[in-house]
Image (cartoon, grey):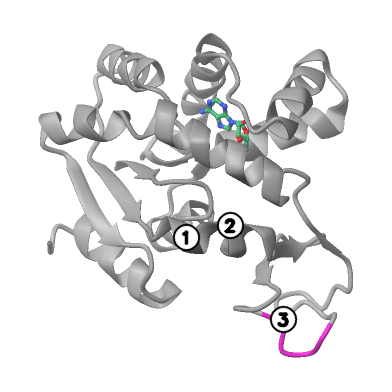
């Protein structure tokens, strides 16, 4: 089962991808996470990624396509994957179709998380995660049950993404509009695009996505 979650930054792609990963036992492939790991490692790619991410811009298509092509060949992708943050341009979408065709497979579902964009800046600038287990939180909408202690693992260390500040978020939203939103008609024309209400509560969004993946919608 090959699934893409599409939507602007802050739409909930990462949160939902993690839930689907558990429900369907296929891995979440987040190009943003891969780039953040590269930044941490200090590699040449990481240094380039840091500049691009801090500016809220997009990495070059050829690099990102190669990154995903390498990743989907790993054994844990044998039964499929959930793409979170890729493709982000129509060029990437076309390259993905071609690489899947070469491997004798194809996309099963492209799911758009539709959100009210006014809410996104607040959603993104308030989010943070556990530095130990990655569980996601929000200053206003999802605080830990005990202040300063992760519900999932008990850690007291938390972190925020450097690109989750207001200026960078606005640049990321612009990149979404200019470069990523044009992918939607590409998949609509293929008849595989389905939309869910990304403003509904997290469990409801998960239910809607699962219904699509299980063919009930
Ligand atoms: P994300 O974690 O998906 O919000 O991605 C964080 C940042 O990584 C983005 O703002 C881009 O700078 C970069 N990035 C992630 N995925 C891609 C991609 N598929 N193509 C280009 N840049 C990407």
Residue 156 position within the rendered picture, expressed as x and y whole percent measured from the top left: 89, 74
Q: Is residue 15 visible?
A: no
Dividing the image into four quarters, tell me where ligand 1 lies.
Answer: top right
Give above or below for 159 relative to 108: below
Residue 145 forms part of the magenta stretch: yes
Decide which of 172, 206 is in the foreground and name it. Answer: 172
* Residue on which disc 1 sits: 118
Q: Residue at x 67, y 70 (%)?
A: 137
Residue at the spot of label 3? 151
Question: Disc 3 or disc 1, which is closer to the eye?
Answer: 1
Is 162 colored magenta in this rendering?
no
Residue 90 percent coordinates (x, y):
34, 21
Q: Which element type, helix, strand or loop, lies under badge 1?
A: helix
Give the residue displayed 16% in from the left and 39% down from the top: 192
In terms of image quadrants, where is residue 35? Answer: top right
Residue 109 position within the rendered picture, expressed as x and y whole percent measured from the top left: 24, 43
> What secondary structure prevails in the magenta region?
loop
Q: Residue 121 carries which label?
A: 2
Q: Do the residues labelled 1 and 2 touch (CB within 8 Å)?
A: yes
Q: Distance between the residues labelled 1 and 2?
A: 7 Å
């Amino acid at each position: 089962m090959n699934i893409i979650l599409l939507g602007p930054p802050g739409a909930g792609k990462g949160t939902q991808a993690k839930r689907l990963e558990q429900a369907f036992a296929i891995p979440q492939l987040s190009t943003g996470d891969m780039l953040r790991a590269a930044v941490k490692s200090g590699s040449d790619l990481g240094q380039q990624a840091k500049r691009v991410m801090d500016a809220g811009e997009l990495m070059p298509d050829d690099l990102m396509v190669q990154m995903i092509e390498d990743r989907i060949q790993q054994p844990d992708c044998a039964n499929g994957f959930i793409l979170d943050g890729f493709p982000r341009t129509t060029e990437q979408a076309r390259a993905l179709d071609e690489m899947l065709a070469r491997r004798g497979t194809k996309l099963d579902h492209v799911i758009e998380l539709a959100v009210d964009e006014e809410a996104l800046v607040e959603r993104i600038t308030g989010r943070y995660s556990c530095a130990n287990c990655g569980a996601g939180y929000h200053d206003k909408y999802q605080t830990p049950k005990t202040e300063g202690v992760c519900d999932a693992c008990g850690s007291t260390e938390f972190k925020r993404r450097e690109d989750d500040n207001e200026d960078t978020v606005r640049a990321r939203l612009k990149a979404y509009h200019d470069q990523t939103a044009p992918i939607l008609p590409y998949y609509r024309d293929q008849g595989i695009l389905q939309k869910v209400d990304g403003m509904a509560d997290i469990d409801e969004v998960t239910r809607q996505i699962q219904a699509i993946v299980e063919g009930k919608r």
